[in-house]
Each structure stands twice: as C-alpha cells, then as structure tokens.
Image: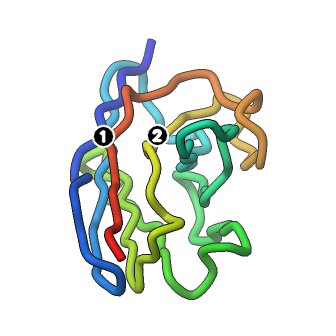
Amino acid sequence: QVQLVESGGGLVQSGGSLRLSCVGSGRTVSSYSIAWFRQAPGKVLDFVGGTRWIGDRTYDADSVKGRFTISRDAANNTVYLQMSSLKPEDTAEYYCAVGYSGSVYYTPSGYDYWGQGTQVTVSS
C-alpha cells in the first residue's frame, strides 16, 4: 500500500508560480513511476508530467512544456511539480499518482495509487 499526499496548491495570478509537493509513504517507491494529472471542472483527467524514481528523464504534456518541471527528492519520498508562467487554463485539481509498472503512462489507468488532490486556481 502506498499513501500519497499533495500540497502546495492555492490561488495565484496569471504569470505567477506555484510548487506542488507529493509525499509518498508506505511501500517503497524506488522502482515506481510517478506522475501528475489535473482535472478542470467538467473535463477529463489530463496528464501533466511524469518521471521514474530511478533515472532523470521526465515526460511533460505539450501544454506545459517549458513552464512546468518535475523533480524528485528520493531521500524524502517527495516529488515536486514546479509551475511557472501560470495561465488561467491551468486552473484545476492536481493529483499525483504512482504506478507499480515503473513506466510513465499518459493515461490514468497506468497508475495504481492516487493522492487526494490539491486545487490550483489561476486568476486572470
């Protein structure tokens, strides 16, 4: 069992920045993949970015390339999503998710555990 807790969401003006955190606990996550998804009201859950605990490669959705960055603090089982140049269309509930397979999938079905979400609201 893996527990994930996101934090760092809030209200920010357009052009601003936020850093989301996702802390994992429970079973070791060293071989897992971890990703961020987001869901805006009335829309589907969308992939934002992902990485593996082992290795440096990250995968980003086209809509956030150059603006969002994923990083890890393996010693503390924490993954961050640094968001810059935020736009009103980035407003959504943001979720982190962990997958046993170790592969980064762009669909929610590729992940086994989910956090409770943290709300990000970007005002224009």
Identify the mark nearer the N-term, 1 or 2: 1
Mark seen at residue 95: 2
Locate residue 1 relative to residue 40 in the image: left or right: left
Q: Position of residue 77 (x, y in %)?
A: 32, 44
> Which residue shows up at 57% across the image and 71% down it?
56
- Badge 2 crowding class, 10 Å Cα cut-off, few under 14, some 14 to 19, many 20 or more, is many
Q: How many marks?
A: 2
Question: Which SS class for mark 2?
Answer: strand
Question: Residue 6, located in which quarter of the rendered image?
Answer: top left
Residue 113 location, x and y as percent?
53, 23
114 lies left or right of 42: left
- Vertical relation: 32 (above or below) 26: below
Asked if disc 1 and disc 2 are in contact, CB closer than 8 Å, the reply is yes
Residue type at mark 1 is: Glu
Q: Which mark is residue 31?
A: none
Q: Quadrant of the N terminus?
A: top left
- Please give left or right for residue 120 compared with residue 28 in the image: left
| Residue drawn at x 22%, y 55% as measured from the top left | 10
Of residues 39 and 4, the one drawn nearer to the viewer in this rendering: 39
Q: Amino acid at mark 2?
A: Tyr
Along the line of sight, which residue is nearer the eye, 20 or 38? 38
Where does label 1 land, which residue? 6
Q: Is residue 56 above or below residue 2?
A: below
How packed is label 1: few (under 14 Cα within 10 Å), some, or many (20 or more)?
many
Q: Position of residue 34 (x, y in %)?
A: 55, 45
Q: Residue farthest to the front?
A: 124
Q: Is residue 100 above or below residue 1?
A: below
Disc 1, SS: strand
Q: CA distance from mark 1 to mark 2?
A: 7 Å
